[in-house]
Structures are given as C-alpha cells and as structure tokens.
Image (cartoon, coloured by chain):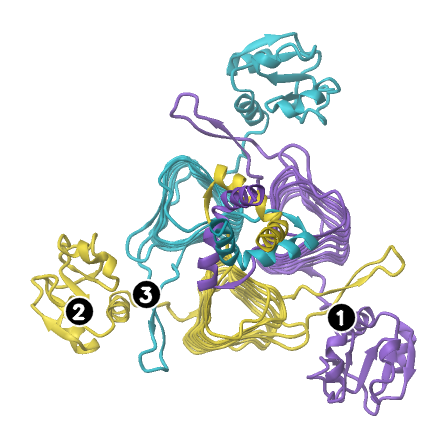
Chain colours: A yellow, B cyan, C purple
C-alpha cells in the first residue's frame, strides 16, 4: 500500500498484512484487495468489510480500523489504483495475415492490427493504436495514437478519431445522416437522398460504448470534443457538435444539428429534437425529451412518474383533459 | 396429426385429409398446415380458416368442424408443434479454415465454427455449440453446450454463456461498463476511467436479441439467470443481476447495479435507473421509467397518453403548472 | 451552373465566376460551392454568404445578388445537385479472395463483394450490387440490383431486399422475432420458443440506418414497402408491415404485428405497442408511445414537457393524484 500512497498521495493509516493484488467492493473485497468508500450510503458496510485496505475521505478517517489511505477524492483515487492493478491489455504489434490493408494506408510498426480487419485506401493509423478483430475502416480514415478499436468497429471513409480513445464493439461511426427531400410533387415521387458528404471528427480521450452510432455530417462535420464519454446504444445524428467532457448515457438519441455544450450530462434514454442548443453544465434526466434549447446550467426533467397500473389508469385519463380541468377551476374560483 | 397427438398429448377430434407439413396462422394456413386458437379475439376467424387442423382449448372444442387437437395450453402446444416442423438448423461440425483459433482455446469436434471467426486464447467452446460467421470471442470466454451464436456476436474476455442459448447477430457481451470518476479538481482535469474487471455470466437457455449490449461488471459480475429472454436493441449496464425466466422487450435500457427478479416482464422501451431492485413477478409497461425499487408484484406504468397534437398542446401546458393548479383548488375549496 | 440548370430546370439568374466544385451550407459555402435556401429561417444568412451560387424559390428570387437558380422546390433541387457532385462510390466489380461464397450462390460479374464477406447457399445477388466488407448473408438471401450493403450487415436466411437500397453498417435483418409461450404449468417450466419461420421482405429504394434490427416474421413475413427510410438504432418486431415512403427516425421501437401505413412519419424515440394500425399520413412525435390504432392522418403526441428539475418535482407529484384532484374540483364546483 505504501507504493500506492507514494504514487497517488494521501495519508496512510495502518499497514497491510498481505500484499494487495486487486480491488474489490466493500462487501466483496478479500484481505488481498483494496476497496473504497466514496458514498456515505455504504458507511454501514464498512464494519463488516474483509478488505485488506480502504481508500476513504478525511471525514470517514476513523470509521474503520482497517489499513487505509485517506485522500481528498476517494473515488478518483480508487480509479487510479484500479488502473494500476488492471492496466489496459497489451497487444503484440504487427498486422495479422488475414487483415486486408488497402493501398496507401499507413500502419506504423507499433500498431496492432488483428484478424479479419479491413483498412481502406489512404487510412492513417496512429502509433501504438490497436485495431481489434473484425474492424472495418474506410478510405482515408484517421485513428489517433494509442486509440483502441476493440472489435467489430466500423468507421466510414474520411472520419477521424483522436488519441487515446476506446471504441467498443459494434460502434458505427460515419454512416450517412438521415436526410431526404420530399419529392412528391407528381403525387407519385419519393424521397430524394441528400448526399452526406461531411465527416465525423472525434477528439482525444473519448470512449464510445457498444453498438452506438454517430452519423457523418450532411455538408459540414459532426464533431465530438475531447474526453467525451458515450455509453452503449446511443444515436447521434448528423452535424451534432458535442463539447469536451460531456457524458451521454445509454440509449440516448440526439437528432441532427444539435449543439451540446461542455460537461453536459444526458441521462439514459433521454432525447434531443434537432437544431437545439444545450448549454455547458446542463444535466438532462433519464427518459426526458429536450424540445427547446437549454440556456442555463442545472438539471432538467420531463418524465412521467411510475405508478401502479390501476393508479395510472385512474389518473392519466385526466391528463387528456387537463385544459378543461384548469378552465373549470378558473370558473369555479371566479364565480365565488 | 396422430403422431403429434402421441408426442404432445391432448384429445384428437377428426382426422386430417392430407399430411401436415407446417404451421400457419388461422387466416393464412393452407390445408396442409396446422394452426392454433389461443386468443379468443381470433375465434371469429376460425369459421373461414382453410387450415388442415387446429390446436385449441376445451372451451373452443366445438367451434369448428376442422380436425383438431384439444389441449390444456394451445399456445404452448403450438410452440412444440412448430418446433417439430422447424427444428433448429443443423450445422456441420468442424472449424472453417478462415477461422482464427488462438493458442489454448478448446473447440470440441462436435462444435461448428464458421468463417471469419476469432476465438481467443484459452476460450472453451461446449459440445455441439455453433459459433456463426464473424463472431469474435475474447480470451478465456466460455460458451456452453449446444449454444448458438448466430453471426457477428462479440464476447469480451472472460465472459461466460451457459448451455442451449441463442445469441443473435450484433450482440455485444462484456464491453466495459460506463464508469468514470470526475477528476476536475484542477478545473481542467477529465474523467478517470474505472477499469471494468468483472465479467458477464449468463445462465442456460437464454436468448438474446440482435444488436443488444450487456456490459461486464466493474468489480463483481453482471449476472443473468437461466431462461432469460432479451429482445433486440436492449442495453444492460454493469453489475445488473437478472433472475430466471425474466423477459426484457426491445429497446429497454437498464442502468448499472439494478437487480431484476425472476419472471419479471419489462415492456418495450422501458428503463430502469441504477441501483434499484425490481421484485419477482413485476410487470413494467412500455416506455415506463422505473425510478424507485418495486417491492410488490403487479403491473406498473408511467407513460404519457397519446393525444392529437392540438389536444396535447392544450393540455400539456398545464402539466407545467399542476402544482399551482392544485394550490388554487385547495384555496377555492377551503375558502367556501 | 448552366449544366446544372440544363439538367434540373429552373431559371438561371446571373452567371458564376468560377466553376462550381461542390455544395455548402449558406454559412460555410465558398465561392466554388453552390448552396440553397429552402427554409425562411436562414434568409438573414443569405446577405453574408460567400457561396458561388444559390438555389432558391421564386419568392426569394431577389434576396441576393449572387448567381442563382430559381426553382419550384429548392430542397429537392439541392438534393439533385448534391447527388451530381457526390455520386455514390463506384466499387470495382468482382469477389475479394477472402470472401466465402457457399455452394449455389449466384453473384453476377457486375456485383462487388468485398473482403471477409460470407454469402450463404443459394443466395442471389443482383446486378451491380455491392456487398461491403464483413457482411454476412444467410442461405437463399436475395439482394436486388444496385443495392449497397455498406459493411458488416447481417441478413438471415431467406430474407429479401429490393433494388437500389442502402443498408448501413451493423444492420441485422431477419433475426428471430421475440415469441415465446409461457410453459410454467408445472410451476417449474420455462418459455417455449415459437420458431420464427417467416421472412423479412423489403421493397425497392429503401435505406436502413446503422445498427437497426428488423425481425423476421413468426409464420407470415415482416414486410417493408418501397422507398421506406429507416434511421439508426431502430427496432422493428416480427410481422410488422410498413407502407411505401414511410419515414422512421432514430431509436424507434415498433412491437410485433403492427401495420404502419404509407407516408407515415415516426419521430425519434417513439414507440408502437403491438398489433396496432397506423393509417397513411399519420405523424407521431418524438418519444411518443402509440397505444391504440391511429385511424385519421394528422400529428399525434404524448410526451412530457421539459421542466427545470425543481419545477418537475413540484408538479409531477400531482400527476399521481390527478384523479383525486379532478374529483375534488367536481365536488367544489358542485357544492357551490
């Protein structure tokens, strides 16, 4: 634990009996694991913890006799400790013989390209990057240094990803935005496709979750800043611009041409209709639909409360006549 | 039909004129197909049915002169009959020459490994399992006997799937959970990644739909029981625990560390915020957000009713002032 | 510009100084790009535009001194111009040596089959079709002439796609519908799978977005008409029938056996519970759940309004007692 303290700072109280080999939760950690207390909700679990050591804040310093590291930000400290115990996998550099590298693509010797990969003409792979099995990169794609495409990632032509990113399996970056002009003048026409010729440009240190899609811009680009974290099953429409450090939880859908600020948090299943702006620092709750621009930081919510179905039936019928209800109330109040 | 009756039980009434070759709906079945009546809504279609035979319950026994099999549970009986007519495809055992099997992986002779597959170091494939084209299995993955990964399934390292499962195309199992610690103390930091070192452990007889994602646990595992059925486009966060026989419909999102009981039904597009419990036998309606634990079985709903847009405009404005409306009512009632 | 006018019609006003090389937005277009004005919201941007030429309607004819093409439908005209400048990529015909073509599959010389593709027994590929890298087509799949499967598309056995379609990366067509019969009679049973033996049949000129799933029918087929446009992350259940020219935005979920008419528009994140009909020309707003059939064209909405979280807390508690509130109002009004 002393080496952890030397690397990460903080005050060490007590000394561990056995070498630490990994991390654990307060409830599951064994005597060779280090755990953490960052949420006061779990204080009561501390007494029974069998962990070999605990990371906690000054306020919780004396809650336990276990060996402990007292730090300003226990959760961040725990993240750093866990990173030390579980460094990202090391991939042997080199190109697997089954990978197809098209003419003009540049793959440095330090990069790792796995089996069944396809890298398009003129693509540029960064130093130390990992292109996992089954990934498909279109022509002139650019992947930054030390970025890891885990497996089965598809990046369409000309899109660009920064350094140190992690792109999970099933992600599709740069598919055509959803743009069609209605051409029904003859009564019998159809939808005319607007060619989507912009790119997707993603900054450094981004992580993008499994099976998420980010569409390319129609004319200008779709842009993600640095340190943007996107969860699984998210849909980001064409020409969205997303600021640094923004967090987008699972199943979010953001329609085209939305501008999302820095350090925004979009809760799971929330949505944004197109052509809006959400300012820096806004927080959108789960399953909330943003239908107009948000111009002040703070939390915004628009979800229905959970009810027993019988209660819902009794109440929801009145949502359909709220206008009439309000009118009736006004008349009643006014007629007194 | 006699052989069906011998296999599945029930009372046979009448005899078919032609051999039965498959199943059909009441409306579309031909004289060589067998159909079923399980929903009283379709009783009126029975008179016009051209089916060669019908599976139905005792209450509907005399609704038709068609040859029929009278059983206790017509829908289950129909499922068994359909299974007899459409057994799962048989795949030739063996490993396709384009598949990459890394060192130490164990693939039994009875298994079928298709083209463009990648199987990681030390992975263990069960007897009779099918690894379809384009699947990617990480190191030390375990797939149970007779489980079928249809195509393009990705399973990250160390995750485990039980026997007799069906995993559809595009599924991603074991991607990193969405866990980051905010490290902005210097005003200019970023999100510190919490390494996700738990696994996904899935029981026997599970079916998982196309393009669904199930994240690995942060420290402990994400766990699915036996006979869990998950539809397409579902997102299951890290450290969720899901009980036996639970049904999760399409587009559901379940945030991390949720515990879902046995025989729960999650309707399409519903969501669960994290760290909740949903008890055995609960039913959550479509597009309902579960924001607190459910402790009693029954149906729960929290969706907005559908309105003509003009009606919605007239009513919904009052949702934004329901508190004031309730206050006004109280004053009016009180001032009488 | 004269050649554009000759191809597309309209009145040419002024003449360009430099050859046009592409399209741009009003704000970003350079003097070698042509832009368009289709939305009066952007009129004020026209004065500052550096575009080489503008496509606009007769009403806006004199808003700018820039060279311009005055047409009846500027947006459609712009689409056509953009298509001329950005024709779909041309793929060299032929089959990549790493592609696996199973016995009996028919691939015409004019088709292009990329690396790591798998085409099942008896599949039929149309003239000039493109099967991009990593696509997997099951046995007896049919792909129409000039249809492009961009990359990593999975089509299950026997499904069929028409001509001139575009199917984006990660799409899964024809996975099993979600159908199980509850067989818990012994208290200890499980879900009996209903074999899904129908197909998916998709018409001509359809576009299907990244990571979308369309399930095969249980007995009859799932059917999409012609010119259906589907965005990313959409889920379409078994036995749905979708009419010509219908538009389905991102993250929509449509449960099984729904019948959607012609020229319907489903907003992002909206949902349809199963076994409903939505008539021609209906428009469903974003994140609206359709719980009953829609029989008249028009716009339908059922979403909660966005509120500051504090306001939401104050208001939403009364949604749970709307029934009581309405009763209280009735008593108050009645007791006067």
Calculate the distance from the C-alpha at mark 1 to the C-alpha at mark 3. 45 Å
Q: The residue tagged with tag 2: helix, strand or loop?
A: helix
- The reply to whether residue B207 is in sight is yes
Q: Chain of mark 1?
A: C
- Is circle 1 on the same chain as circle 2? no
**In this rendering, which labeled residue sits more in front, label 1 or label 3?**
3
**In this rendering, which labeled residue sits more in front, label 2 or label 3?**
2
- The reply to whether residue B103 is in sight is no
Q: Where is B21 relative to C208, above or below?
A: above
- Label 2, residues with CA under 10 Å away: few <14, some 14-19, many ≥20: few
Residue picked out by circle 3: B194
Q: Residue furthest bottom?
A: C17
Q: Are marks 1 and 3 in contact (CB under 8 Å)?
A: no
| Residue B103 in the image, given as x and y percentages of width and height | 35, 55
| Residue B317 in the image, given as x and y percentages of width and height | 60, 59
Q: Residue at x 51, y 16 (%)?
A: B72
Calculate the distance from the C-alpha at mark 1 to the C-alpha at mark 2. 65 Å
Q: The residue tagged with tag 1: helix, strand or loop?
A: loop
- Residue B336 shown left or right of residue C10 in the figure: left
| Residue A24 in the image, given as x and y percentages of width and height | 22, 58
Q: The residue tagged with tag 3: helix, strand or loop?
A: loop
Calculate the distance from the C-alpha at mark 2 to the C-alpha at mark 3. 23 Å
Residue picked out by circle 1: C87
Q: Place residue B127 in its image quadrant.
A: top left
Q: Chain of mark 2?
A: A
- Is circle 2 on the same chain as circle 3? no
- Label 3, residues with CA under 10 Å away: few <14, some 14-19, many ≥20: many
> Which one is nearer the viewer's eye here, B130 or A186?
A186
> Which one is nearer the viewer's eye here, A77 or A63?
A63
Residue picked out by circle 2: A59
| Residue A167 in the image, given as x and y percentages of width and height | 46, 66
């Amino acid at each position: 634990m002393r080496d952890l303290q030397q690397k990460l700072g903080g005050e060490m109280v007590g000394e561990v009996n056995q070498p630490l080999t990994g991390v654990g939760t307060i409830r599951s950690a064994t005597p060779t694991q280090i755990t953490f207390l960052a949420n006061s909700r779990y204080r009561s679990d501390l007494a029974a913890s069998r962990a070999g050591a605990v990371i906690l804040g000054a306020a919780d310093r004396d809650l336990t006799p276990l060996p402990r590291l007292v730090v300003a930000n226990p959760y961040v400290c725990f993240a750093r400790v866990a990173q030390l115990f579980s460094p990202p996998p090391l991939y042997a550099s080199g190109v697997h013989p089954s990978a197809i590298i098209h003419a003009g693509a540049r793959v440095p010797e330090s990069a790792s390209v796995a089996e069944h990969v396809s890298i398009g003409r003129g693509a540029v792979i960064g130093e130390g990057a990992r292109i996992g099995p089954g990934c498909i990169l279109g022509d002139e794609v650019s992947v930054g240094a030390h970025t890891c495409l885990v497996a089965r990632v598809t990046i369409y032509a000309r899109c660009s990803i920064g350094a140190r990113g992690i792109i999970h399996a099933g992600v599709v970056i740069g598919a055509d935005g959803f743009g069609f002009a209605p051409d029904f003048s003859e009564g019998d026409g159809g939808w005319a496709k607007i060619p989507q010729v912009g790119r997707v440009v993603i900054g450094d240190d981004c992580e993008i979750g499994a099976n998420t899609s980010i569409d390319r811009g129609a004319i200008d680009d779709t842009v993600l800043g640095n340190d943007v974290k996107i969860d699984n099953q998210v849909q980001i429409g064409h020409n969205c611009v997303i600021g640094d450090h923004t967090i987008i939880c699972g199943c979010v859908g953001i329609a085209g041409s939305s501008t999302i600020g820095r350090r925004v948090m979009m809760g799971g299943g929330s949505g944004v209709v197109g052509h809006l702006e959400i300012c820096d620092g806004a927080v959108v709750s789960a399953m909330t639909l943003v239908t107009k621009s948000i111009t002040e930081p703070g939390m915004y919510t628009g979800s229905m409360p959970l009810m027993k179905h019988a209660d819902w039936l009794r109440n929801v019928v009145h949502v359909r006549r709220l206008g009439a209800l309000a009118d009736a109330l006004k008349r009643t109040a006014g007629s007194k």
